Each structure stands twice: as structure tokens, then as C-alpha cells.
Amino acid sequence: MDVSRRRTLLKVIVLGDSGVGKTSLMNQYVYKKFNQQYKATIGADFITKELRIDDKMVTLQLWDTAGQERFQGLGSAFYRGADCCVLVYDVNILKTFESLNNWREEFLKQADPDDTNTLPFVVIGNKIDKDGGKKRMVSERRAREWCASKGNIPYFETSAKEDYNVDDAFLGVANTALAGEHPQDIYVPGFPETASEVEQRGGCAC
Ligand code: GDP
Ligand code: MG
């Protein structure tokens, strides 16, 4: 197989209470868009983002869901084969931080039991822009301590609204997922094109 056409598919699921900004973070990262209006996500769906990490072409498959589905169960298709689980909370609402452990446990319960030792998490504290940080209820230190206590979970603080640290957070997600054992190489015919293929169609490789 042509190595240049290998891509690594990483399945990432994003969990956290309703309203913390899961959909906004994903939209900011993939489409560079922020929507002020709150539209509850219906069901579960994914969007993808292509990125290059060193010499590796990576496809991040980001699975979104609505927080209120928690107790109805999301179905095994949602969790199956996940390479990374992103836990999102709102730094201005304590309850959303306190929920993180439930989300983490939910994931560990739902994911393949054999995988639970190696499945990596990332935590994102979102909405750090809000009220200039004056009404913040969870300090960075407290969040980092919690992450450290759960096996050194990488931690990022973001603003989906201001596009602050969003790229870095998802790059951290990709690296964390790559460090796990699950990523699967996929072969995408025709991508990326070779120089001669580009020449044949008379185009540029941009
Ligand atoms: P989800 O339920 O976790 O998917 O949350 P949404 O992405 O739908 O966001 C819920 C609300 O919070 C929306 O009104 C967003 O516009 C708002 N929001 C999301 N991220 C941020 C942020 O970083 N800063 C601020 N100020 N508002 C945000
Ligand atoms: Mg949503």
C-alpha cells in the first residue's frame, strides 16, 4: 500500500453537561464559526477534521451529543471504537465540573471493558471569556488537580466564542488519541494526490 495515502482515523467522543459548549467548540474548530444562539443538539452525530501531525495524516472524527441523553444511554455505536473521550465543562458553573466524574464513569462503563485501561481522556474547561472571568467558579488549579488525580488527564482551557486555545485543545486531543493503542489506519483512494496525478488533471496541489 502507498504509505502516503495512509490516514489515521481517530474517533473522538465529546461528553459533558448540556450547554457547556460542546457543539460550539466543535463548530469553532472545524468551521471557524461561533453561534450565540443555543440550539440543543438532537441525538448524536459526528463531523470530521483533517490534520497533519508530523508526517502523519490524521482524520479526527468528532462525535457530538446532547447532554440530556445521558440516562437514556447513547447506544453502543456511539462509544464503540472510541480513541479518545473529551470531557467538557463550563468554568463558570460548578455543577458542570462536578459532573465530570459521572461522565468519565459513564464512558468507562460503556466502552469496551478490555479497553478501559488504555482509553485516554482530555478535559476542556470552556467559556473562560465569560464576564471577563470574574464569575468563574472553578479555578484552573482545582481542575488540574482533579485531572492529575484521574491518571494525569491532559487539561485545556478554551473559549469557543473567542476562538481561544481551541486549536491547541483539539491538537492535544489528537495527540492523546494517537498515544493510545486503538487508532486505525484507513486507506483513502485518491487522497492525497500524487504529483503526477495532479499534473494529469492539470491542477495544482493546493
Ligand atoms: P452544548 O449543549 O454543550 O453543545 O453547548 P452549546 O455549544 O450549544 O453552547 C451552549 C451556549 O453557550 C450557546 O448559547 C453558546 O453560544 C454558548 N457558548 C458556547 N461556548 C461559549 C464560550 O466559549 N463562551 C461564551 N461566552 N459562550 C459560549
Ligand atoms: Mg450541543
Image (spheres, rainbow, N blue to C red):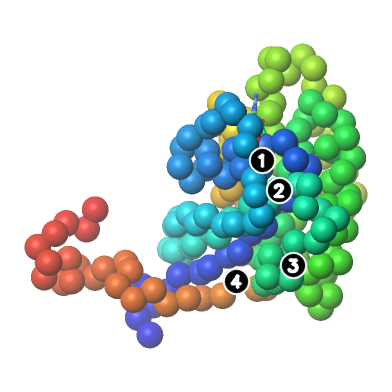
From this viewpoint, is residue 83 visible? yes
Is 164 left, or right, of 193 in this rendering? right
Badge nearest the viewer, 4 or 3: 3
Q: Which residue is mark 3?
A: 75
Precedes in sequence: disc 2 or disc 4: 2
Q: Which residue is mark 4?
A: 183
Is 176 left, or right, of 61 in this rendering? right
Q: Is residue 14 above or below residue 31?
A: below
Residue at x-position 84% and y-position 46%:
100
Amino acid tagged 1: Ala
The Cα atoms of the two marked residues, 1 and 3, are separated by 19 Å
Q: Secondary structure at mark 3?
A: loop
Q: Secondary structure at mark 2?
A: loop
Q: Residues within 10 Å of mark 1 (few under 14, many from 20)?
A: few
Amino acid tagged 2: Ala
Query: Which x, y percent locates residue 164?
Result: 57, 30
Numbered marks: total: 4
Q: Which residue is mark 1?
A: 40
